[in-house]
Image (tube, helix red, strand yellow):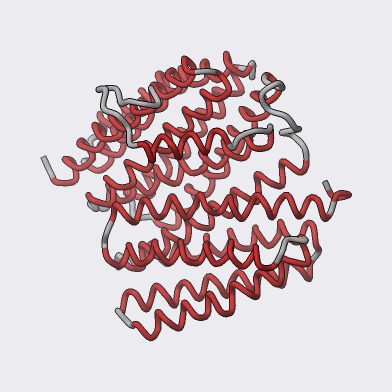
């Protein structure tokens, strides 16, 4: 058995075992206690979901994150990067148990357990498919696709339809599309078609919102006593979309820096344009509220901050302390105050508050790059997810303030 095959086969056990941790908040399937920090973080995330827009936003972010973490795991597996695969496999499993906890908060523990079992199995089927692709085993690939389409899709669609009262055909189509789009990511990664990989990743990420929106709105409608507020309002639309773009930015940026520091120049070249497109999409969201001049100003600031991070990554790669220090000075001394000054009058948020939130984004992203440069893969994956989740701390207050400042547009 080749090293890559061993990696992927072992990954199946890893993902399956870790995903099973969500069957109970206090133990794994083997009865081993979870760490208090893991339970506390999960409890805090779920308890923060008070309203319909909270639920919709959180569900969308977790579903979108699932697609990206899965892509990072399969990409590192197919690239033979064992430690990186293990690290992202753990984060992918934790993402799954977080989704299960969110489902449980609405539908109860039996639903949480059922969700976790179905979700865990679907992660395993994708590991099987990736193993088949890596080893050019057509039979294994076909078996995995059959398992995904004839086991996972109908099981998951029935579970969601029964729980939410959404039409079974609608949920089946949404779930099938998720399978197809994730498969496309793996196929492109195996072919080293990096432009195709990022295109499929972005398509798959955006599609997850279609699932999250449908399930989130239906859940709020079903449990109006648990979740106040209108999950389908224009304000909720804006909040969810802004948060998703910010989350995507972080993960695309870390993918770009990771490929650059890993010497994968073709992949880095493909990541850059997609990261830029994400930025212009953010600019368009700002422009839809504040107009073309604001969009242009935002795009200029945002593009510059991407460039500063490229400079920092170059410094890390070259072990050039001067270049690294200059990039940090540009980020903290130019980008942070400039962006805060742009946002403060537009939102009404205190400039000092914005400075702290934006600076935290800079520092958490810097932490990912530092870990990538040191090849500390467990830290890379943990810091990647932590930094991505921090983006909601910026996105939520921005969305709330923008809506409050511009009520006629929402």
Q: How many marks?
A: 0
Seen from the viewer's position, the closer of residues 351 and 166 is: 351
Quadrant in the picture for residue 219: top right
Seen from the viewer's position, the closer of residues 110 and 32 is: 32
Q: Residue 313 in the image: x percent, y percent?
A: 39, 72
Residue at the spot 72% in from the left edge and 41% down from the top edge? 236
- Residue 332 relative to residue 370: left or right: right
Q: Is residue 322 above or below residue 106?
A: below
Q: Is residue 47 above or below residue 89?
A: above
Residue at the spot 27% in from the left edge and 59% down from the top edge? 376
Residue that sits furthest to the right in the current view: 408
- Residue 398 relative to residue 47: left or right: right
Q: Is residue 318 above or below residue 169?
A: below
Q: Is residue 100 above or below residue 136?
A: above
Q: Is residue 141 visible from the viewing direction of this image? A: no
Q: Residue 40 in the image: x percent, y percent?
A: 44, 37
Seen from the viewer's position, the closer of residues 6 and 227 is: 227
- Residue 74 relative to residue 157: left or right: left
Residue at the spot 42% in from the left edge and 31% down from the top edge? 97
Quadrant in the picture for residue 14: top left
- Residue 361 relative to residue 129: left or right: right
Residue that sits furthest to the left in the current view: 1
Q: Residue 193 in the image: x percent, y percent?
A: 38, 55
Q: Where's the N terminus, which quadrant?
A: top left
Seen from the viewer's position, the closer of residues 2 and 28 is: 28
Quadrant in the picture for residue 66: top left
Residue at the spot 61% in from the left edge and 23% down from the top edge? 170
Q: Is residue 275 visible from the viewing direction of this image? A: yes
Q: Residue 357 in the image: x percent, y percent?
A: 59, 61
């Amino acid at each position: 058995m080749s090293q890559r095959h061993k990696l992927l086969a072992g990954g199946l056990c890893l993902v399956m075992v870790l995903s099973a941790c969500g069957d109970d908040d206090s133990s794994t399937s083997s009865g081993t206690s979870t760490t208090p920090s893991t339970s506390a973080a999960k409890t805090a995330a779920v308890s923060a979901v008070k309203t319909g827009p909270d639920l919709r936003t959180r569900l969308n972010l977790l579903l979108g994150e699932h697609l990206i973490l899965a892509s990072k795991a399969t990409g590192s597996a197919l690239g033979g990067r064992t430690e990186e695969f293990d690290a992202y496999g753990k984060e992918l499993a934790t993402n799954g148990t977080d989704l299960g906890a969110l489902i449980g908060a609405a539908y109860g523990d039996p639903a949480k357990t059922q969700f976790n079992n179905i979700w865990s199995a679907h992660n395993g089927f994708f590991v099987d498919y990736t193993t088949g692709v890596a080893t050019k085993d057509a039979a294994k690939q076909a078996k995995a696709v059959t398992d995904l389409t004839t086991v996972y899709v109908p099981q998951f669609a029935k579970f969601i339809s029964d729980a939410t009262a959404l039409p079974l055909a609608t949920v089946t189509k949404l779930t099938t599309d998720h399978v197809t789009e994730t498969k496309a990511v793996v196929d492109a990664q195996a072919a080293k078609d990096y432009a195709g990989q990022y295109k499929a990743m972005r398509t798959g990420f955006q599609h997850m919102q279609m699932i999250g929106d449908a399930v989130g709105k239906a859940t709020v409608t079903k449990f109006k006593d648990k979740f106040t507020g209108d999950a389908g309002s224009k304000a909720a639309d804006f909040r969810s979309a802004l948060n998703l773009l910010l989350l995507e930015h972080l993960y695309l940026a870390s993918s770009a820096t990771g490929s650059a520091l890993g010497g994968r120049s073709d992949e880095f070249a493909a990541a850059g344009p997609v990261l830029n497109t994400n930025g212009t999409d953010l600019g368009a969201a700002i422009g839809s509220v504040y107009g073309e001049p604001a969009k242009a100003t935002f795009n200029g600031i945002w593009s510059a901050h991407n460039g500063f991070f490229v400079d920092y990554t170059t410094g890390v790669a070259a072990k050039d302390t001067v270049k690294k220090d200059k990039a940090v000075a540009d980020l903290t001394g130019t980008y942070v105050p400039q962006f805060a000054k742009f946002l403060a009058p537009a939102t009404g948020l205190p400039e000092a508050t914005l400075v702290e939130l934006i600076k935290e984004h800079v520092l958490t992203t810097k932490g990912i790059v530092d870990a990538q440069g040191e090849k500390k893969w467990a830290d890379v994956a943990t810091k990647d997810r932590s930094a991505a989740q921090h983006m909601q701390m910026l996105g939520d207050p921005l969305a709330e303030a923008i809506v409050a400042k511009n009520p006629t547009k929402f």
